[in-house]
């Protein structure tokens, strides 16, 4: 079969980090009508590869070919004009532009004449594009205030509306609801059926077996193998990615479960935005998982427990102290740590180092007579880098230079070494590779065994089933199901969500 897209001998280094380190003979191709899955640990080079394909990463060496001809994009807009569109891992929408302006970014000439904007035409074009992904939202709203799912759908709409030949999708499904993910996979399938070529990056190996024709595994910037997905199992792919077996480590965690202790966090008749009353007694050494479809209220519950969203009513008592009136910083100081879902918007200082981001969870430890002595956090940061296998030169590396999954690990690392009694984790392993996920599960299990009380909101049912002592399923803002161990199957929980 003729190739639509071809990559050969790609190399890219950032100082000593070899993000892409293919030898001259290494070639990866995608034929028309095919979906290529890209798998690899955090920092393996997947996003760098996609960045190189749209010209946002300048390669040190290598060759890209589109339709048999040399292809050298100068940036994402140039790539788009040549028929290559990307949905990046971290959203690139401009927060201060409207939905319509973002959807039509780069197409302004289509609705502007002699410098005058034709608003009706703009709105019609934007509506057409959003129709491709079944998104019906206010065209005049600012993108900065949208939920992440809508931002991703806008990026998908923008890409599809440009009618590209090659579509690159970087870890998009992990922020989408089931319905959103279904729309994404349907569009990918029809795009391929119409002769397009797709490169799809995900850490969810079931998505690779279900939706991809072939899988290429990257490790330390090199191509380890490419196989038709029908010929490799998910555990084969995981093995190629991390170079070791993972299942045994997980079942070990299952065996170590013990009875929870005293109630640490008592939540009474809390009214998170858009939700019914929510009550919970969370015990020391207990993990309560909360799941449900998008808009079910689990996200609002997590944010309200953390103090990131105000509650309309109710009480939250932490070890006998009423913390209801406290905002996010006050709750953190009181002992409720929070890992948000949208890490770049809500969680991390991208321009600061790993050490400073981790130390943010412990400012009280590092302030002396009103001055910050963050250098004292270096050892703690190095410990987190090693415990969580954060791929970085040192604790001085800026978070903006880390891969997505490694950023997520920094966010978690901020709290895992802290002595906080309560952790509220909102999709804590989003974008984290299978090996590091096992490591994070192990650390959370240790935190649980050490008596921490943990609430995990997760879109991944296997994660909830693996970690939780209790699972709450929410629908339309209310808890409709509560299950204790032994927990029901994934299928039964999905049934409860619908
Ligand atoms: N701008 C940059 N400056 C310095 N190092 C960088 C930069 N961008 C990427 N890197 C490094 O290159 C390596 C590959 O990163 P990349 O984002 O491609 O990984 P990835 O496979 O996409 O990981 P993830 O699964 O976590 O998204 C990492 O070690 C990362 O820290």
Image (cartoon, helix red, strand yellow):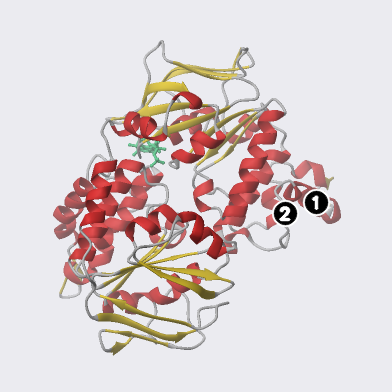
Separation of marks 1 and 2 at Cα, in angstroms: 7 Å
Number of numbered tags placed on the structure image? 2
Q: Using the rendered view, name the quadrant where residue 220 is placed.
A: top left
Residue 155 shows up from this direction: no
The residue under the point 38% across, 28% down is 218
Please name whichever residue, 295 or 279, is drawn nearer the observer in this view of the structure.
Answer: 279
Left-right relation of 6 to 227: right
In percent of width and height, residue 473 lies at: 48, 68
Q: Which mark is residue 191?
A: none
Residues marked 1 and 2 touching at CB (< 8 Å) = yes
Q: Using the rendered view, name the quadrant where residue 361 is placed.
A: bottom left
Label 2 sits on a secondary structure element that is: helix
The residue under the point 28% across, 88% down is 321
Label 1 sits on a secondary structure element that is: helix
User: Mark 2 sits on what residue?
Assistant: 100
Quarter containing the C terminus? bottom right
Residue 309 shows up from this direction: yes
Q: Is residue 375 above or below residue 82?
A: below
In percent of width and height, residue 102 lies at: 66, 51
Q: Is residue 323 above or below residue 155?
A: below
The residue under the point 69% across, 41% down is 106
Left-right relation of 64 to 405: right
**Mark 2 CB within 8 Å of ligand 1:** no
10 Å crowding of disc 2: few (<14), some (14-19), many (20+):
many
Quarter containing the N terminus? top right
User: Mark 1 sits on what residue?
Assistant: 122
Figure quadrant, ligand 1: top left
Q: Using the rendered view, name the quadrant where residue 157 is placed.
A: top right
Please name whichever residue, 120 or 198, is drawn nearer the observer in this view of the structure.
Answer: 198
In percent of width and height, residue 335 lies at: 26, 75
In percent of width and height, residue 35 lies at: 58, 29
Sooner in the amino-acid sequence: mark 1 or mark 2: 2
């Amino acid at each position: 079969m003729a190739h639509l897209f071809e990559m050969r001998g790609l190399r890219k280094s950032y100082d000593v980090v070899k993000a892409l380190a293919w030898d001259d003979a290494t070639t990866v191709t995608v034929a028309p009508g095919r979906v290529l899955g890209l798998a690899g640990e955090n920092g393996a080079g997947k996003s760098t590869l996609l960045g190189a394909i749209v010209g946002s990463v300048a390669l040190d060496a290598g060759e890209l070919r589109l339709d048999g001809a040399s292809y050298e994009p100068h940036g994402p807009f140039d790539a788009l004009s040549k028929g290559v569109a990307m949905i990046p891992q971290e959203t690139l929408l401009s927060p201060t532009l409207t939905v319509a302006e973002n959807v039509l970014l780069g197409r302004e000439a289509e609705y502007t004449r002699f410098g005058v904007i034709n608003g009706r035409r703009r709105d019609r074009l934007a509506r057409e594009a959003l129709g491709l992904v079944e998104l019906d939202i206010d065209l005049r709203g600012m993108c900065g205030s949208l939920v992440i799912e809508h931002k991703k759908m806008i990026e998908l709409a923008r890409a599809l509306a440009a009618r590209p030949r090659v579509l690159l999708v970087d870890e998009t499904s992990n922020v989408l609801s089931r319905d959103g993910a279904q729309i994404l996979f349907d569009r990918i399938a029809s795009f391929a059926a119409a002769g397009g070529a797709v490169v799809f990056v995900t850490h969810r190996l079931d998505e690779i077996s279900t939706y991809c024709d072939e899988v290429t595994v990257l490790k330390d910037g090199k191509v380890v193998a490419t196989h038709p997905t029908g010929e490799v199992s998910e555990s084969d792919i995981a093995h190629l990615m991390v170079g070791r077996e993972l299942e045994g480590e997980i079942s070990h965690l299952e065996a170590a479960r013990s009875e929870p202790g005293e109630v640490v966090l008592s939540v009474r008749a809390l009214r998170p935005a858009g939700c019914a009353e929510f009550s919970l007694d969370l015990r020391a050494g207990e993990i309560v998982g909360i799941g449900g479809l998008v808009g079910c209220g689990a996200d609002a519950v997590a944010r309200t427990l953390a103090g990131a969203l105000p509650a309309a009513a109710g009480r939250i008592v932490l070890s006998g102290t009423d913390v209801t009136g406290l905002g996010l910083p006050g709750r953190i100081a009181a002992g409720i740590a929070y890992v948000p879902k949208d890490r770049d918007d809500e969680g991390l200082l991208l321009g600061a180092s790993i050490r400073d981001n981790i130390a943010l969870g412990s400012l009280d430890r590092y302030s002396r007579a009103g001055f910050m002595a963050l250098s004292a956090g270096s050892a703690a940061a190095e410990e987190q880098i090693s415990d969580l296998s954060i791929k970085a030169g040192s604790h001085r590396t800026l978070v903006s230079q880390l891969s997505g999954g490694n950023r997520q690990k920094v966010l978690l690392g901020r709290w895992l070494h802290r002595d906080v009694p309560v952790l509220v984790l909102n999709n804590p392993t989003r974008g984290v590779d299978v090996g590091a996920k096992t490591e994070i599960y192990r650390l959370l299990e240790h935190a649980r065994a050490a008596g921490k009380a943990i609430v995990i909101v997760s879109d991944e049912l296997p994660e909830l089933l693996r970690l939780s002592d209790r699972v709450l399923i929410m629908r339309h803002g209310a808890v409709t199901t509560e299950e204790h161990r032994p927990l029901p199957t994934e299928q039964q929980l999905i049934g409860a969500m619908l």
